[in-house]
Amino acid sequence: MTIKLAKSEQTLQSIIQAALRIAVVEGLAAVTLGEVAKRMNISKSGVFARVGSLEALQTKVLAEYGRIFAENVFLPTLSEPRGLPRLNAIMRLWIGRGTGENAMAGGLHTTAAFDLDHLESGLRDQLLEWVMTWRGQLKRTITLCIEEGHLRPDTDPNQLTFEINSLMIGFLHDARFVRDPQVHERAISAYQRLISTYRSFSYTG
Amino acid sequence: MTIKLAKSEQTLQSIIQAALRIAVVEGLAAVTLGEVAKRMNISKSGVFARVGSLEALQTKVLAEYGRIFAENVFLPTLSEPRGLPRLNAIMRLWIGRGTGENAMAGGLHTTAAFDLDHLESGLRDQLLEWVMTWRGQLKRTITLCIEEGHLRPDTDPNQLTFEINSLMIGFLHDARFVRDPQVHERAISAYQRLISTYRSFSYTG
């Protein structure tokens, strides 16, 4: 019985990974039970039995993407000194994730946001919750920059969070759609310029 | 015969407007010949006869959106003095277009870019061409700011064009998806901060 449960869980994980591979490149709307079944070479009813509904699968895909994003962009930076070194590390990892061969692996939450923006649905609510959780983490990192004296005391953390997010959404647009080979340098340079306007005169790190 | 042609042209225009209304809210992928026919209360074959193909209709929708965008955001600013007054006017109109009741009327080219980014298609090529034409106009406006001495001579017009575009794509994300009531003020403030880093010390306009 334990083994059977484990196998069932394994199949579910494989389904989520197959759906995620579709979603990151083609968008969340391209994820269908039929398409996932085809790629896994199993029956559509087999997929349905594991995930329950398309929306449940899409929710799991967004959650799994969020987990991978946090694991790659946020968690490694917690070993950096709090303040600007940590924020800089986040930006290096975040920008690095959307560049070159990885260009299409970044931005699922952003592409999905533009897919779902006109809807009132549980899926939109879930995505919004994740987006706001990530913004909260970013804002907390920025607040630490102020507390450490790296950014000016009159810095508005909500405004800077918006500005960094906008930069990254524009970066994703140019990496994915325009396919600009210089987009990595453009984003780094834009971030440095932005931070220069918030930086404390006394901090030289 | 002339009257018949005129009527046929009128029907085509009505089809494009109906398709545009779907596209700006729900995205370009939501435009189908069937959905347009339903909303206009005519037959699907009637729509097909006028437009030829779905891709032809979607192309016309993107072109019509581009025409409206230029008419609302770019052309009115040509009467402003060249340089920063004109760039500021563009930003006021652009940000104003995506705010409040208009939130869903802005950004079709951006939402479509995230829809089409993984494809190799005539539609993507058309959209990219329009996006780059608009960037060219923005870049030209920025170059005039440098020539007029309003922005510093070492300003990189391509970099500033990227930064303004990114800001506006992030703005669209927060207006449409996050539905942040403060997004208008955030965007204005972000633009002012950005420009302050490029501004000539000698220009006080």
Image: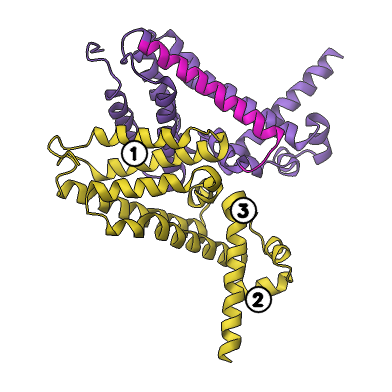
Chain colours: A purple, B yellow
Q: Residue at x 27, y 51 (%)?
A: B86
Asked if residue B26 is among those painted magenta in the image, a careful observer would answer no
Q: Choose the circle earlier in sequence order: 1 or 2.
A: 2
Q: Which numbered tag is attached to residue B163?
A: 1
| Disc 1, SS | helix
| Position of residue A32 measured from the top left corner of the image (x, y, whole percent) | 72, 42
On what subunit does the disc labeled 1 rest?
B
Q: Is mark 2 on a helix, strand or loop?
A: helix
Residue B31's quadrant in the figure? bottom right
Return the residue at label 2. Answer: B49
Q: Nearer the viewer, residue B121 or B136?
A: B136
- Please tell me how crowded label 2 is: few (under 14), some (14-19), or many (20+) other residues with Cα within 10 Å: few
Chain-order first, disc 2 or disc 3:
3
Instruction: Give the x, y percent position of residue B90.
Output: 34, 50
Distance between the alpha carbons at the discs numbered 1 and 2: 43 Å
**Tag 3's secondary structure?**
helix
Residue B15 can be seen, yes or no: yes
Q: Main secondary structure of the magenta part?
A: helix
Q: Does the magenta stretch include residue A129?
A: yes
Q: Residue at x 66, y 72 (%)?
A: B48
Region of the chain picked out in magenta, as a range: A118-146
Q: Mark 2 lies on which chain?
A: B
Kind of residue at badge 2: Ala
Q: Give coordinates of residue A110: x percent, y percent.
A: 53, 36
Is A144 situated left or right of B13 in this image? left
